[in-house]
């Protein structure tokens, strides 16, 4: 009988817990959900019991505290730890896994709290230690990073002889009726959006001002939406693992309303991560802002509309230039009905479950630290269709993004 520990009881943790519980007999065995605030875990466990008639265990743990996490791991003895807390906890959780001998999966790469910068170098540095310990660490098993990497591996394996450009396009066309809210952790989301844009071209990184390059894209199931070039972490691993691709970019849609709020918040200093003194206390404006904004976990009941995320790829197959699009569409209300979470949590939580399933079933079990595109995409693609994120693909007559930028 396997055992699975999920750490982090936010929107994503809720979906992972629901999905693992559903497959507890076949794959995940006994499931435990732990977070700093145990009451959040208990509320999710109660929902799973009510909706699915399955019991999961809960616990309190501070994932910044390695000895406390190791103690929990030694006590519960899981086969795998699914980290859906925050990117700040990646390294401490990897340390704890090494100490307790547990495989590791996460959905977002490590970010130091005081530098708004995410890079794989900190986690890639664990390669040798995981190899020596005979343990697997699977990095970035969400949607983007995650499914978008697997889409790319699928295209490389089955649809192209060589690829020249990759554009990842991410649209959340959901609306929650609130003046301003982020779909996942506001602190992480705002750090990502306010950073300088960056893309890979001709063997080097090129930079743009934040949210300065935008274009329209016709998203299946959604329609045309304006999207903007951002730096996103999967570009770093994809550029490393698909060195032949000439240009790789990432685009995300934002409404004018979202961008106006963000500009005002930025303009008045509310997105800063530099502490300020307030009534004798050090306060980080962005952390305070997070406390004021709606909890993304509470948006499920309010969010309507669809998400659409995919990869637009140009390359060559059988000597001919080919343009291709592979994507998933997801409906916020359907996600909520199934798990009590909105689509952005769902599209992250399902791949986290599938990534862990790949490791537990031995399909992606290999000592070391790996990104998603380094494994055979086929079993993962199969499971996406089975567990709630069906994908579609089609050939395009031309690449709509070829001339942009
Ligand atoms: P939330 O903020 O809703 O949830 C995070 C949870 O982590 C909270 O329940 C919080 O628990 C818990 N947590 C925070 N610090 C600690 C700690 N020190 N120890 C234990 N638990 C802790 O975030 P989301 O659910 O929206 O996102 C979860 C992860 O998914 C993030 O890393 C995010 O970057 C990633 N993500 C990845 C995406 C992808 O496609 N790859 C897309 C969206 C998100 P508590 O309240 O108990 O403190």
Image (cartoon, rainbow, N blue to C red):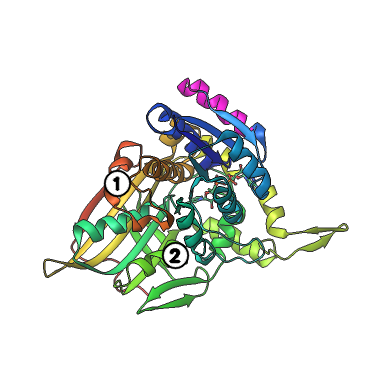
Q: Above or below — where is 320 with respect to 175?
A: below
Q: Which residues are magenta?
A: 40-54
Marking on residue 228: 2
Q: Nearer the viewer, residue 289 or 322?
A: 322
Q: Nearer the viewer, residue 332 or 238?
A: 238
Q: Residue at x 69, y 61 (%)?
A: 270
Provide the residue designation for mark 1: 381
Which label's residue is closer to the chain start, 2 or 1?
Answer: 2
Whole-angstrom CA distance, mark 2 to mark 1, is: 27 Å
Element carrying mark 1: helix
Q: Is residue 172 left or right of residue 73?
A: left
Q: Quadrant of the N terminus?
A: top left
Task: Give coordinates of residue 118: x percent, y percent.
Answer: 54, 64
Magenta-span inclusion, residue 53: yes
Task: Give coordinates of residue 336: x percent, y percent.
Answer: 47, 34
Element carrying mark 2: strand
Q: Above or below — where is 38 with respect to 257?
A: above
- Image marks 2 and 1: residues in contact by CB distance under 8 Å: no
Q: Quadrant of the C terminus?
A: bottom left
- Secondary structure predominantly adopted by residues drawn in magenta: helix
Any part of residue 337 in sight: no
């Amino acid at each position: 009988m396997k055992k699975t520990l999920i750490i982090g009881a936010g929107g994503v943790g809720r979906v992972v817990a629901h999905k693992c519980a559903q497959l507890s007999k076949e794959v995940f065995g006994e499931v435990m959900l732990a977070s700093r605030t145990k009451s959040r875990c208990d509320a999710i466990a109660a929902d799973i019991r009510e909706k699915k008639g399955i019991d999961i265990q809960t616990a309190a743990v501070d994932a910044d505290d390695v000895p406390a996490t190791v103690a929990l791991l030694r006590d519960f003895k899981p086969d795998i730890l699914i980290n859906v807390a925050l990117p700040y906890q990646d390294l401490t959780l990897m340390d704890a896994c090494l100490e307790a001998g547990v495989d590791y999966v996460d959905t977002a790469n490590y970010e130091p709290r005081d530098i708004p910068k995410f890079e794989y170098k900190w986690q890639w540095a664990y390669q040798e230690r995981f190899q020596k310990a005979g343990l697997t660490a699977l990095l970035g098993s969400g949607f983007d990073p995650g499914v978008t990497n697997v889409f790319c591996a699928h295209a490389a394996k089955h649809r192209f002889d060589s690829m020249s450009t990759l554009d990842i396009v991410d649209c959340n066309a959901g609306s929650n009726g609130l003046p301003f809210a982020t779909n996942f952790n506001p602190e992480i989301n705002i750090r990502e959006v306010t950073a300088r844009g960056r893309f890979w071209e001709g063997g080097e990184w090129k930079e743009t001002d934040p949210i300065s390059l935008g274009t329209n894209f016709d998203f299946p199931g959604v329609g045309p939406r304006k999207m903007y070039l951002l730096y996103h972490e999967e570009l770093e691993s994809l550029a490393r693992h698909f060195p032949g691709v000439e240009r790789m970019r990432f685009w995300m849609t934002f409404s004018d309303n979202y961008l106006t709020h963000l500009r005002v918040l930025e303009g008045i200093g509310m997105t800063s991560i530099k502490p300020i003194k307030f009534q004798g206390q050090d306060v980080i404006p962005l952390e305070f802002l997070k406390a004021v904004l709606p909890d993304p976990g509470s948006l499920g009941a309010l969010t309507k509309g669809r998400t659409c995320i995919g990869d637009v790829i140009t390359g060559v197959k059988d000597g001919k230039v080919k343009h291709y699009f592979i994507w998933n569409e997801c409906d916020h209300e359907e996600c909520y009905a199934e798990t009590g979470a909105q689509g952005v949590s769902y599209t992250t939580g399902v791949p986290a479950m599938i990534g862990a399933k790949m490791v537990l079933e031995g399909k992606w079990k290999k000592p070391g630290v790996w990104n998603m595109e380094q494994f055979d995409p086929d079993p993962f693609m199969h499971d996406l269709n089975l567990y709630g994120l069906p994908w579609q693909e089609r050939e395009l007559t031309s690449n709509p993004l070829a001339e942009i930028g």
